[in-house]
Image (tube, helix red, strand yellow):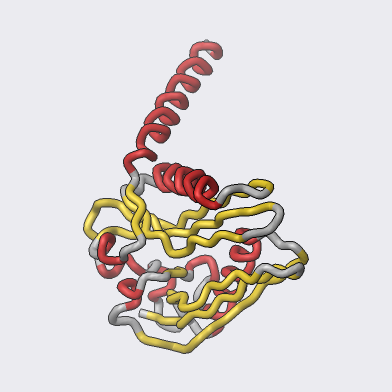
Amino acid sequence: MKNLFLMLFAALSFIGYAQTNNDWEKVIITRNPEDVKGLKRLNDVSAETSRLYGKQSKLRDETTKKIKQEAAKIGATIVLITVDNFAMTPINNVNMVGTAYSGEVSQQEEKVPQKAEVSGEKVSEEDIIITRNPEDIKGLTRLGDVSSEASRLYGKQSKLRDEATKKLKKEAAKLGASIVLITVDNFAMTPINNVNMVGTAYKK
């Protein structure tokens, strides 16, 4: 009986993998915000590929494939790329960040998590949405600008960006924001690699 259960579980897992493995090829990659207008926002996705003296075009192709696979896992049909950065070091790398959307029509109230909508309630950092699409903040109240930076000796671009994003969310939470529109996202490559992010915080 136990063996039968394990075989069934393995079969279902393989089917799920196969579906995801096939679906990622259908995911559309765009850099035009108009292409996702009115679609339902799912979540942010990211990917990175690095290789010793790697060729930029090949690194970007591989990273694009990875970000499509991440998007397929959450049922997305299209990804709006918001960061696509090539860092040239002995370990060349491409870091991509995007927002995944489904083909469903978005409801205005779904843009901001419910927890962040409660007046007077302290906003959790985890609930704050980071966006680079100006459509996401239409009709919201502007609170103020926020910024952050993460630096490390020969630091990896993706990890520095993740760290800077967390810091930015902390600053936005202090203002009671529910969403931040990123206006600057810059990776500087020096022995002390760093990512600097600037954004405008909004609330519903």
Residue 3 located left or right of residue 134 = right
Please state the total of marks drawn on the protein image: 0
Residue 26 place in picture, x, y as percent: 32, 41
Name the one closer to the observer, 120 or 37: 37
Name the one closer to the observer, 86 or 110: 86
Q: Can residue 144 be seen in this view?
A: yes
Residue 48 located left or right of residue 27 = right
Residue displayed at 41% across by 60% down: 81
Residue displayed at 26% across by 65% down: 34
* Residue 2 in the image: above or below residue 189: above
Name the one closer to the observer, 43 or 36: 36
Residue displayed at 39% across by 87% down: 142
* Residue 165 in the image: above or below residue 42: below
Residue 101 located left or right of residue 147 = left
Residue 11 place in picture, x, y as percent: 45, 19
Residue 63 located left or right of residue 119 = right
Residue 175 place in picture, x, y as percent: 51, 85
Name the one closer to the observer, 52 or 49: 52
Residue 36 place in picture, x, y as percent: 28, 61
Q: In which quarter of the image is the C terminus?
A: bottom left
Q: Is residue 121 visible?
A: no
